Each structure stands twice: as C-alpha cells, then as structure tokens.
Amino acid sequence: MAVSATGEVGGSARRGRRVILWRHGQTSWNVERRFQGSTDVALTETGLAQARRAARLLAGLRPDAIVASDLKRAAATAAELAALTGLEVTHDEALRETYAGVWQGLTHDEIIARYGDEYTAWKRGEPIRRGGGELETEVADRAAPVVLRHVDKLPVDGTLVVVSHGGTIRTTIGRLLGLDPLNWESLGGLTNCCWSVLGEGARGWRLTEHNAGTLPEAVLGDDD
C-alpha cells in the first residue's frame, strides 16, 4: 500500500489538483528487454490483465479526465480505465515514448555492444541523442505542456490521468518538478502499469507517490 509524502495512506488527501502518470502494461518487447521507443508495439495478454487490474484501482481515485499517448500499448491501457469510469480518452502523439532512432528494436545487450559509449554518456546525464533520436529535454518539451494544458481544464480539486511511457513520464515529472535534467535519472523507472502522482502545492508540483500500484517488481522498459 502506497504512503504519500503527506503521510496519508494511498495519497488520499486532495489538496489542489492531482496528476496521475500511468505507465502502459507489458509488451513482448518489454519482456525481451528490447528498446521500443516510438515503435507501436501492442500489449501482451499479461499486459492487458495488468491494465484491467490497475484500472480498477485508479477508478477508485475518481479521475476527472484521461489523456493518453496514441501508441497502441498506451491507448489499450487507457481504454480499460475509460470503460470503468465512462470518461472519454483524449489521445495525443506528444505523449509518445522517446524516439531513439537506430536503438529501437535492439535488445539492451545489443545496445551496449554497438553503442556502449553513447549509452554510458546518457547514463552519466549527458544530453545524448540516443540512436540519433530525441534529447530527453525535447521529450519533456513536447509532453509536459500537454499535461499542463489538460490540468488547466480540471476543477480546483480535480484529477487527471496521463497514460504514457516510462521515459516520457520520467522526463515529464522532472520538468514539472523543476529538476535539473542532470538529475532526472534519480527518478527511478516505472514498472509496467504502475503510476506516479503529482500533487499541486502552494509552491508548485510535488511528487507524492512513485511507482505505486503493486508489490515491487522488476522494471522492464527503455529507461531502466
């Protein structure tokens, strides 16, 4: 059971608006540790079951709106919550995972073997275009404004669910918290179908829950 930064179980305190950033369910490429990026990979049966389970929990938080990446794995995850809440899902390609060029489709071991120096530099926090793709700051540049635009439509104590991808969620959290991009790596990865919660406080956004939703499991994704 998650405990919020305010000390309340489940993060139930409603102080201002709330953003729940929910990672999609498992795909076959997650299991194979294959870098997905913007490649449109569907959920596995396990991933669909994860989405259904998580949706039942998130529905209890009474979301007011759902916005999701248009990639199949995120759209299918969001559809499970929409079916329970009756909310429509707004899809936005700006919430897609990081485009990573030639890294996409490669396994973790293949990336290390072929692009080891580039991988190491990225892990150090250097601004690297992995595989010739996007910078992490560019991902935040496109994704964070989408989140804020939908937050602006919420009531004063409303909840927005954002269904996206591990790397995109991490960079968006870093941007909304005002962290230096060099420190975004300090935000651990999200397990499939787990979520993080940002609450609106007097001095801006704060992280009240991270990687919530299940007992600890291995993180399988592009940003692990």
Image (tube, grey):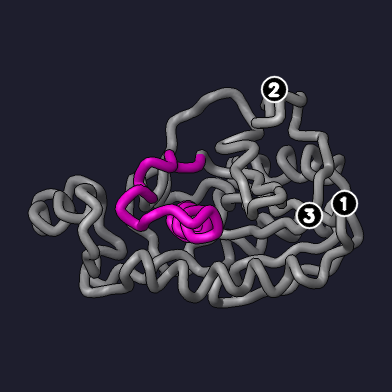
Residue occupied by mark 3: 17
Q: Residue at x 76, y 58 (%)?
A: 160
Q: Earlier in the sequence, mark 1 or mark 2?
A: 2
Asked if residue 199 is positioned above or below residue 216 in the image, the reply reads below
Q: Quadrant of the N terminus?
A: top right
- Element on which disc 2 rests: loop
On the image, the x and y values in percent for residue 33 come to 33, 46
- Element on which disc 1 rests: helix
Residue 78 in the magenta stretch? The answer is no
On the image, the x and y values in percent for residue 103 come to 24, 64
- Check if mark 2's residue and mark 3's residue have beta carbons within 8 Å: no
Q: Nearer the viewer, residue 68 or 64?
A: 64
On the image, the x and y values in percent for residue 208 come to 64, 38
Q: Earlier in the sequence, mark 1 or mark 3?
A: 3
Q: Is residue 109 left or right of residue 116?
A: right
Q: Marks 2/3: CA distance?
A: 22 Å
| Quarter where residue 7 is shown | top right
Q: Nearer the viewer, residue 126 or 73?
A: 126
Q: Marks 1/2: CA distance?
A: 22 Å
Numbered disc in front, either 2 or 3 = 3
Residue occupied by mark 1: 84
Residue occupied by mark 2: 1
**Type of the residue with mark 2:** Met
**Type of the residue with mark 1:** Leu
> Is disc 2 surrounded by few (<14), some (14 to 19) or many (20+) residues within 10 Å?
few
Q: Is residue 61 left or right of residue 25?
A: right
Numbered disc in front, either 1 or 2 = 2
Q: Quadrant of the C terminus?
A: top left
Range shown magenta: 166-190
What predominant SS class does the magenta segment belong to?
helix
